[in-house]
Amino acid sequence: MSMHKMNSEHGLAWVTGASTGIGRALALRLVRGGYSVVVTSRNHAKLVALQQEAAPDGRIIVLDGDVTDPQDMERVLASIEYDHGDLSLAVFAADVTVPVRGDDLHREAFERSFAVNVNGVVNCLLPAVAHMKSRGHGHIAVMSGAAGYGGLPGNAAYGATKAALINMAESLKLDLDRIGIRLQVISLGLVEASGSSRLGFPAAGVVNVDEAAEHIVAGLKSTHFEINLSKRTNAVARLSRWLPYGAYFALVDRLTRQGVAPAVATTKHASAENRPHQAV
């Protein structure tokens, strides 16, 4: 197990998807905790506004970039390394939610979801791991969620990407431990955000993005592999997988019809910067 512990004195933090939602709130929380934070998204204006808001508390470094472009992410990491210092903590929070219904399938929904949510993480992960490996230590957290533990109506693309991230993180954890890099997954429940749709299983309650950021920071300081923002939501999601498929689908159908776990609203998806971050 990697012994690397979260400490602002070890180097910079890097947060992707930082122009809105949880990524933005987390960047502010890390600054207030003493970190100099590199923020990345495609929306330069929103990153500058974030930088100005954080100015009284600490330093935000704006490095625009598109997580779907591997060369862009290599450029961002090179700028961190050569212009700003060692990278100690990376949180890959950029994602996009594209509703998918079985009676109205579109290839673009799957391609966009995997481009941002999975390939976007890989594009950040590769240069970050190379940088941290050369220094013998580092800490990476990947944004996943309960949607990755079981299929739900309307969730075919989003849920599949989160399942992929969970599996990828589990597969990489021990290898990264051996080279001094700590890897965690952030398993979100329901997070209050403008325009967000309710996804997934019943939750104990909806938290706002500031509360979510507080929970994430506490989890980053813990020894757990999974940072669990909604224990009830994730427990139900996990336990449901022990059910036979007949019982599982009956449960999901009943909850969906009752409005307890409604399917994703069939609205056009937002960009990775302006997405409705329901964050399941």
Image (cartoon, helix red, strand yellow):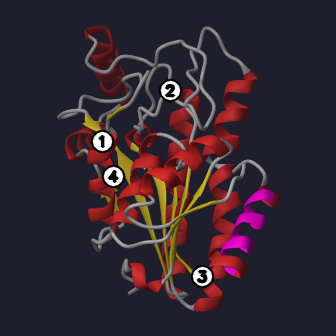
Between marks 2 and 1 in the image, the one whose residue lies nearer the viewer:
2
Task: Give how far apart the Cα atoms at labels 3 and 2 are.
Answer: 34 Å
Q: Secondary structure at mark 1?
A: loop
Residue 1 in sight from this viewpoint: no
Q: Amino acid at mark 1?
A: Trp
Tell me the tag on residue 5.
Answer: none
Per the rendering, the mark at residue 213 is: 4
Residue assigned mark 3: 132
The image's mark for residue 242 is 1
Q: State the CA–CA distance, disc 1 to disc 3.
A: 38 Å
The Cα atoms of the two marked residues, 4 and 2, are separated by: 24 Å
For residue 12: magenta?
A: no
Given residues 107 and 64, the one toward you in this image is 64
Residue stretch in magenta: 72-81
Looking at marks 4 and 2 on the same chain, the residue that comes earlier in the sequence is marked by 2
Q: CA distance from mark 2 to mark 1?
A: 20 Å
Q: Quadrant of residue 195?
A: top left
Q: Earlier in the sequence, mark 1 or mark 3?
A: 3
Front-most of residues 219 and 145: 219
Q: In the shown orientation, is residue 191 left or right of residue 47?
A: left
Residue at screen point 60% across, 16% down: 268
Q: Nearer the viewer, mark 3 or mark 2?
A: 3
Instruction: Give the spatial CA distance, label 1 vs label 4.
Output: 31 Å
Give the residue furthest to the left: 204
Q: Amino acid at mark 4?
A: Ala
Helix, strand or loop at mark 2: loop
Q: Which residue occupies the foreground of this view, 102 or 274?
A: 274
Outermost residue toward the right? 71
